[in-house]
């Protein structure tokens, strides 16, 4: 079994910053792509940013210029640094990893962490 646990969400004022973390645990041989998604109330889940095993990043429209994805392979952890937060960034943020484990090749989701941007 592989589990992902997110942390770092919370309430922040507009213009503020938060850093999300997502750590994988379990019988892991390697992790390929990692990513962050988010789902706002009443909306579909959308892709925020991805990072390959080699560190190549891709930020999607909602994240460009404000969010930075990074990873620590030694810790099986992915991060999302979010700056200049706006009320429209309010959502549940989910991490996703492509993991090779004793169970084979898996796509694994975290349970989500809530980010609320409000004054």
Image (tube, grey):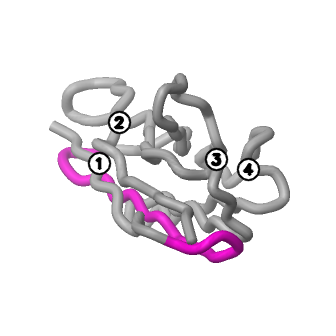
Q: Which residue is most to the left?
A: 1
**Circles 2, 1 touching at the beta carbon (< 8 Å):** yes
Residue under numbered circle 4: 63
Residue 87 horizontal side relative to residue 43, left or right: right
Query: Along the polypeptide, which appears first: circle 4 or circle 3?
Result: 3
Query: Along the polypeptide, which appears first: circle 3 or circle 2?
Result: 3
Q: Report crowding for label 2: few under 14, some 14 to 19, many 20 or more residues within 10 A (C-alpha).
A: many
Above or below: residue 40 compared with residue 9: above
Name the element at disc 3. strand
Q: Which residue is most to the front?
A: 119
The image quadrant where one finds the N terminus is top left
Q: 107 or 15, which lies in front?
A: 15
Residue 27 horizontal side relative to residue 77, left or right: left
Q: Report crowding for label 1: few under 14, some 14 to 19, many 20 or more residues within 10 A (C-alpha).
A: many
Residue under numbered circle 3: 51
The magenta stretch is 12-28
Query: Along the polypeptide, which appears first: circle 2 or circle 1?
Result: 1
State how far apart marks 3 and 2 are (Cα): 15 Å
Residue 4: give its label: 1
Residue under numbered circle 2: 109
């Amino acid at each position: 079994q592989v589990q992902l646990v997110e942390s770092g969400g919370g309430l922040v004022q507009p213009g503020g910053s938060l850093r999300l973390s997502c750590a994988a645990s379990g019988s892991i041989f390697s992790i390929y792509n990692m990513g962050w998604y988010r789902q706002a109330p009443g909306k579909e889940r959308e892709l925020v940013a991805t990072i390959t095993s080699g560190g190549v990043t891709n930020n999607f429209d909602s994240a460009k210029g404000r969010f930075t994805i990074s990873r620590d392979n030694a810790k099986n952890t992915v991060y999302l640094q979010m700056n200049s937060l706006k009320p429209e960034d309010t959502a549940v943020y989910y991490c996703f990893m492509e993991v090779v484990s004793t169970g084979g090749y898996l796509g694994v989701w975290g349970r989500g962490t809530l980010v609320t941007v409000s004054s």
